Amino acid sequence: MDKLLNVSSAPHIRDNDSVKSIMEEVAIALMPATLFGVYNFGLYAALIILACIVSCVLSEYIYEKLMKKKLTTNDMSAFVTGLLLALNLPATVPLWVPIIGGMFAIIIVKQLFGGIGQNFMNPALGARCFLLISFSGIMTNFTVAKTTGIKNMIWYGLSGLNGYAYVDGVSGATPLALLKKGEEVDIISSFLGIHAGTIGETSAVAILIGGIYLLCKKIISIRIPGAYILSFVAYISVYSAFSENGFSIDYVANNLCLGGLMLGAFFMATDYVTSPVTPNGKIVFGILLGVLTGVFRTLGASSEGVSYAIIIGNMLVPLIEKVTMPRPFGVERRKHG
Amino acid sequence: MNKIGERIYNGIIKENPTFVLMLGMCPTLAVTSSAFNGIGMGLTTMVVLVMSNTIISLLRKVIPDGVRMPAYIVIVASFVTMVQLLLQGYLPAVYDTLGIYIPLIVVNCIILGRAESYASKNPIIPSMFDGVGMGLGFTVGLTSIGIFRELIGSGCIFGIKVMGDWYEPATIFVLAPGAFFVLAMLTAVQNKLKAPSATNVENESKLACGGNCISCNRIDCGEKSKAESED
């Protein structure tokens, strides 16, 4: 009788996952896309990624110190936010853009709403949209310019160190913008990612590797990216079928590989804090994002629509969760009316 | 004289309609894209507010309680129409930039709020200066929001370029989201600096519990204090 039995309330089964371990897995999964971005756009892209990460982590550290909150810089979440933000920037931005973006993501979008777990919007995407609206000229300029020197690098951006695959002097428009204009785009290069765009979005194959890694590690469930991509394909197919040229499999496949769709579906839409927790809610959320992205891409003024679709979806998450709350076993179905 | 000063101080600092009372948010967010627009909207509202407060105070014993709202609206709407026609005639630039927001002054909560809570209960002179104070407070609020939005969003203040060529304007600040950012930041600064205002009062209660009912969880409070007072 000397054995003390531990009596506690549920939950009784615990897991060793922590915020830190999950964030580390996400960071590892982002590595293929990051490395490909650096390979594609050159070492200056690495500098942008570094600036984003440093800005995010420092902002979090300074804010939490000043507000005397618990330090969360060790849990890697600010690191992942910075990395995601960098992957969403063109490789030609001046270095002050990632710094301002990182500060906005962490301080305004994340910390002012209560820190990790409390933000209503994906911080990296919030910052990207802030930058996109604020500095639209810089943020949509994918032209590789030839400037050198530290001072020019900070103020005007630089691509003296050009990418290895993406050779210098290539004109600015992204293939997605060309596609929208009705021009032909090579599907193989779209899939591999050797074209203009933001640092991390170009290579569908690199992002898919990371996404499959996360799925295998059970960090994310297939529901959101699956529903997102399927509903997007369905929308684009219908749109393509009713367009002037008739249905074209090339158009659908290019739309799927180009732009931020893959990056958004696997890494942005699946953010734990800003996506629904209910299983059915995840599917509803994915379908909503797919349709919104399709509408923005086909009917909107810009050729891209993933970031706006996801942040609008983020704001509807509480409603989706309310509607799709699962019925516990044995509880009677609620009568309507 | 003291009463007049107190009313103006109250309107500008203590109960500033923009940063403390959070009234009239529609024009505050919509027209403050530049400092000039802010000052134009603020002064227009002030003129209407002073006149409507005066007339409502004058008629406070005539207007029956049951129909006071329609009566106030009629008075305010008459003044707004007058101001609108005057602006159109003499200041067409202001009239063009403010556009639909001039007729909307009729339903501005500051004007109806002051009519309801002050002018309808107080004599003419204090009511008039209440209008002056509140109007100035509104003008100060809108102008300061306008200055920050214009400065960050286009590098100018009152249309004069103050930032160098190196400055890349953050366009979002002259668009709708910028109004929310700047308003929130200025209100936060006002709260942080503990500027004397209606919401930053020190606890002056003589009750043992401190009298801070907002952050108190006791539910037996009312009954207990009643019992204590009966003893």
Image: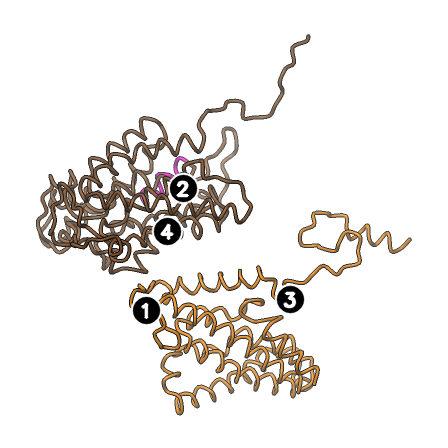
Chain colours: A brown, B orange
Q: Amino acid at mark 3?
A: Ala
- Dots 4 and 3: beta carbons under 8 Å? no
Tag 2 residue: A78
> Bounds of the magenta span?
A279-289
Relative depth, front residue between B30 and A157: A157
Q: Residue type at mark 1?
A: Gly
**Quick check: do tags 3 and 1 share a chain?**
yes
Identify which amino acid the numbered label 2 is placed on. Ala
**Does the magenta portion include A283?**
yes
Q: Nearer the viewer, mark 4 or mark 2?
A: 2
Q: Is residue A215 above or below residue A314?
A: above
In front: label 3 or label 2 = 2
Q: Amino acid at mark 4?
A: Gly
Look at the magenta stretch and give its main secondary structure: helix
- For the N terminus of chain B, which image quadrant? bottom right
User: Which residue is label 4 attached to?
Assistant: A126
* Residue B172: x %, y % from top left: 35, 62
Distance Cα–Cα, label 4 vs label 3: 34 Å
Please give the chain letter of the residue carrying mark 3. Answer: B
**Residue B55 - label:** none
Q: Are marks 4 and 2 on the same chain?
A: yes
Disc assigned to residue B198 = 3
Residue topped by disc 1: B164
Residue under the image location 73 percent in, 48 percent down: B219
